[in-house]
Structures are given as C-alpha cells and as structure tokens.
Image (tube, rainbow, N blue to C red):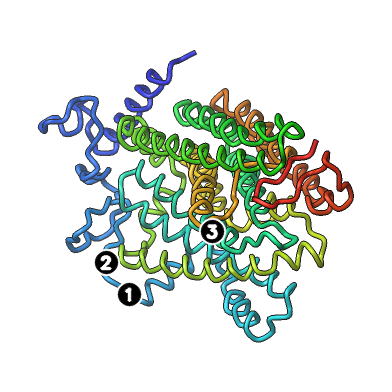
Amino acid sequence: MTSPYHAAAREKRAAERILDERNGNSGGVPRGSSSSRGPHQLPLHSEPIGTEGHGHGSHHHPPAPKSWFPVREGGESGRTGIHPWHFFRIVFRSSSLASRMVNVLWPVVPAAIALRYAAPEQDLAIFILAYIAMVPCANLVGFAGQNLAKKVPHVFGVLAETTFGSLVEIILFIVLIKRYRPDETVDTTQVIRAAILGSILATMLLCLGFCFVAAGFKRDETHFSEIVSEAGSGLLLTAGFGLAVPTAFYNALHGRLDTRELERKTLELSRSTAVLLIIAYLVYVFFQMRTHHGIYDAIFEADAERDDDKHKELRSHRLTLIESIIALAVGVALVTIIAIMLVDRIHFLVEERGVSDAFLGLIMIPLVEKAAEHLTAVDEAYDNQMNIALSTVLGSTLQTALFNGPLVVIVGWGMNKPMGFNFELFDLAMLILAILTVGNFLRDQKTNYLEGVLCVIVYVAIGVAAAHYPNPHELHEAFPTDASPAPATNGSEGAHH
C-alpha cells in the first residue's frame, strides 16, 4: 500500500502541475523560480493562486483597497467597510441553493421571539418555531464563517470554518449545563451527553452519507486523499476510545463500590479524560496548521481546481471582512437567544409529550445545531471537492469529540456542575459501531452513492431505536433496585446492564 508521504508527494506534484498550467508556465520552469522558493515548494499564502499569470478568460474581482488584514485573493470582495444593500443581498443569496432555500425561513425567527414574550404558556408552539428558527440562524453563522475562512490560507480556513460552525453546538451545550438542577426530573447533563454522541453520529453518518450521495449524482465514483481519510479515521478511533473510558470504568465497578463513591470517581476520571482529549485536539490542529500544512495545502488547492462551480464562485460577490464579523456576531447572538428558548422547553417535551432524552439528545438537537455545516459539506461534495467536504465532516466530528464535549465538561467543572462522560451503554455502542462502519467506507479512498445511502440508513435505524428508548428516571421508578440505574445525584447516571 502506498505510504501517506508518497501520496502526499503525488498530491503536491499534481497541485504544482495544475498551478503551472493555469499560469501559462508550460516550459517546465517552476513557479517563482527566480525567487528563493525551491522547485517543489507551493506558492506562499501571500501570493494567491492566479495572481502571477493572468491567462485569457480569467475572472478576477477588482482589486480591493489596501487593508490592515492580508486577505487571500479567493476571499476578496473588492470592497471595504460596510454596504447595507450588498450585505443583505449577499447574505440572502448565501453560498449554495440549499442555503438560499434555508434563508426563506428567516420570518420564523422574529415570530418565535415574539411568541415567547406574547404567549409564554404556549410551550409546544414556541419549541416548534424556535427549532425551525435555529436553522437560518445557524446558516448565517456558517455562511459568515465561510466568508472569513476564504480570506485566510486554505488549511487555516478549513479549521476556522469548522470552528465557526461549531459555535452553535458550544452555545447549546453551555446553556444546557447552566440550566442543570439536581432536584429536577429531567437531567440536562444526560441530554448533553446524548447530544455529544448524537452530534458525532449525525455528522459521521447522516452528513457524510449525504456527501457521498451528492457526489454520486455527477460521478460513478469519487476519490479522496488517503492523507485526509487515514488521519481522520485514526483520530476518530482515539476519540471513541477516550470517550468510552469513563463509561467502562463505571460499569466495571458498578455494584462493587458505594454508588456515590463510584460516581465521584467517575466524574474525576471524566474531567481528566476531558483535559487529555483537548490536548489531543490541539496536537491535531498543530499537525494540520504547522508541521504538515504543506501536505494539506496541496490537497485543498487541488480540490479547489476541480471545483465544478469555480467560475461561478470567482464571479460571485463576497462579504468584506467587517461585514463577515458583523454577520457572525449577529448570528451568534440570535443562536444564543433561540438556544435558551429551546432548552427552556425541554422539560415540557420530556414530561408532557413523552419525548425520550435519548431521542432529544441523539437526534433532535444535533440535527438543528449542525444544519449549517451539513449544508456546506454536501455542497462541497456536489461540486467535486470531496477532500474539502471530508475534511469538513471529519473536522467537525473530531472537534465535537475532542474539544466541544470536553470543553463543556471543564466548564461544568468550573461552574460546580456534575457534567461527566458516563454515557448510556446504548449511546456508546452506537458510537463505536458507527466509527467502525465509517472507517471501513473510508479505507479504499473512493466512494459512491450506495455507501452514502447505507450511512443514512444506519443513522435512521439509530434514530428509531432512540425514539423508543426509555428515560433513565422512568427506568429507576419502574425498577427501584440496586441493579437499576442510580439517580443522577452528582451527574454520573448509571448505565444499564
């Protein structure tokens, strides 16, 4: 099997050939040979693709006035400052047809906020409107993140886009942990634990499945780099192992130690694991951005050249840097308001409508919080940018498992809330099986729509099972024995045997 380094070298050489052909350098002379760069070195980020040779038929934005922030040419708007008419028009048109369709839901946002104050007793109507309203708000955060990401180097841009897309998830988790009350029937820490795994499952199975299907609309088979797939698969297994340690620890000692003592030890283990997972994520970011950024730059630049909508994007309008920051700030503010509205109605859904914690956490919350990232990744896959789409999917999954989830554990630690990693055995089993399934699909560096449909079917099966899964407090009331799960007095519920 070809080593990752040989594959990386091939990717870099292919990218260099594409760049040389694009710039009219047919004589085999390396780009920038008169400069200090070597023959196998990619262009510096300050010299964007397409600026050294302007061939016939090239599409360029008019040069923007000089800015204090160096912007990559691919993200140039040709404007500076704030232009309200351009701002609203660009935001509404968004980056793809799917995002544009989502923007039709914007009238629901003020309707949900107004109903919250006008008729606060209408819990079901408020939840439904807030759930729908979260989608365009999350889409705005994702679109603003995309515009910011295009203004910086490729590798940093992919990481930044993933991070901005995860803001919705982080906000929801923090609101949930802040709303935790030990004397209430619904344990919000249990909802967070289910949502952490549900977010991973939704991205790994549902989003990746739709990416494979979207790519299969135009091509019989879609290929991607083994650098991206191998690094992602290895980290997914590491993340799954790390998340499973506290649960395995609790279940191995359940019934042998005092329940409260075991829960205390499990909570301490969860906090230690959270710190270790965040360290693993930081090493992964350093690997991508510092020591091996040249490999990923070559892969992403080659993908950008294969973009089916490349010419449309070159002619499309973009937000300025200030407009992108404003859009991001507005989106985050609206997401926070909507998240509070959703979390405040969780008790109503669970107690009055009989929705299970598992279904709420595994399915409902991840679907709405990840909407923007899913639309972005599917659009990239449809445009023949499978490496970028796969990096978005795996990056989002790894950020949830290695950073967002551990972060909420540490935040809960600081707030003296008992948030740990003692998952339900059902949830954890689904996670491990999903990681193995996706790893198998990524192993041969190619995919088709059949694999995508299978991923979606697996996700739907998990959703059906979650809808029928009983709540922990219901099990405890039905089986109030030592063999049943212990009450969540300190945030580490017993997993069921």
Q: CA distance from mark 1 to mark 2?
A: 9 Å
The reply to whether residue 95 is visible in this rendering is no
Query: Where in the figure is residue 14, as x and y percent of width and height?
Result: 35, 27
The reply to whether residue 84 is visible in this rendering is yes
Q: Secondary structure at mark 3?
A: helix
Identify the residue at image location x=80%, y=64%.
351
Query: Where is 361 relative to 267, above or below?
Result: below
The residue labelled by disc 3 is: 174
The residue labelled by disc 1 is: 83
Q: Which label is found at residue 79?
A: 2
The residue under label 2 is which amino acid type?
A: Arg
Disc 1 to disc 2: CB gap under 8 Å: yes
Q: Secondary structure at mark 1?
A: loop
Q: Which label is found at residue 11?
A: none
Identify the residue at image location x=35%, y=52%.
150
* Near-viewer residue (175 or 445): 175
* Near-viewer residue (136 or 216): 136
Q: Nearer the viewer, mark 3 or mark 1?
A: 3
Q: Nearer the viewer, mark 2 or mark 3?
A: 3
- Which residue is at the far right? 478
Q: Quadrant of the C terminus?
A: top right
